[in-house]
Image (cartoon, rainbow, N blue to C red):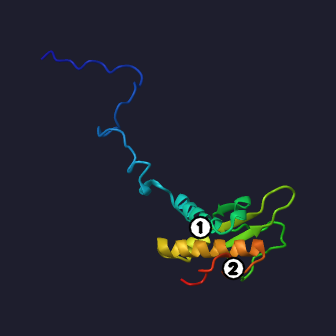
Amino acid sequence: MDNRVPPRASGPGPRRRDRHGRGMRGPIAPPQVPLSASRAEVFADLVRDSVERLERRWPQLADIEFLVLEVPRLDARGDQAWSDEAVPLGGVVPARDGRQARVVVYRRPVEIRTKGRDERAALVHEVVVEQVAELLGLTPETVDPRYGED
């Protein structure tokens, strides 16, 4: 029996398949399908929807920057130490030094307090309305007449 196995090629060559021969993995869902959106992107969309709803009634909101942050920051200087107060769901940074005013919504505290998408959307809108009302010096009911009806 003169069937000899040819020697292996020297050096690694380009791999065309994974080691089990099933091919390379691809995405689970195409990018245009909602499944591929992260929780942070979905949350930012909820904030954007809420702002667009309010901008129809209050065009001056176009001058305000709306941000989504994971969690509220604890001031490292020590003047805002740990306390027993509730974790804020949002905040306001007034305009100054040439910067626009900002409304901030904290994603994780809102997500923890809600169970489903509809409940989350309602709480996000409530937080946005409250922060806009604080920034404009109005009551939340003035900013959105349907505030608190849910």
Q: Is residue 89 visible?
A: no
Q: Quadrant of residue 58?
A: bottom right
Q: In this orientation, which residue lies closer to the viewer: 51 or 32?
A: 51
| Residue 94 horizontal side relative to residue 141, left or right | right
Measured as percent of width and height from the top left, residue 118 is found at: 48, 73
Measured as percent of width and height from the top left, residue 25 is found at: 37, 43
Residue at screen point 47% across, 74% down: 116
Disc 2 on helix, strand or loop? helix
Residue 139 vertical position relative to residue 26 in the rendered view, above or below: below
Residue 142, which numbered label? 2
Query: Which amino acid type is shown beneath numbered disc 1?
Result: Arg
Residue at screen point 42% across, 57% down: 35
Q: Residues within 10 Å of mark 2 (few under 14, many from 20)?
A: few
Measured as percent of width and height from the top left, residue 65 is found at: 71, 59
Q: Quadrant of the N terminus?
A: top left
Q: Are marks 1 and 2 in contact (CB under 8 Å)?
A: no
Q: Quadrant of residue 102?
A: bottom right
| Residue 148 horizontal side relative to residue 84, left or right | left
| Residue 51 horizontal side relative to residue 132, left or right | left
Residue 53, which numbered label? 1
Query: Which amino acid type is shown beneath numbered disc 2?
Result: Thr
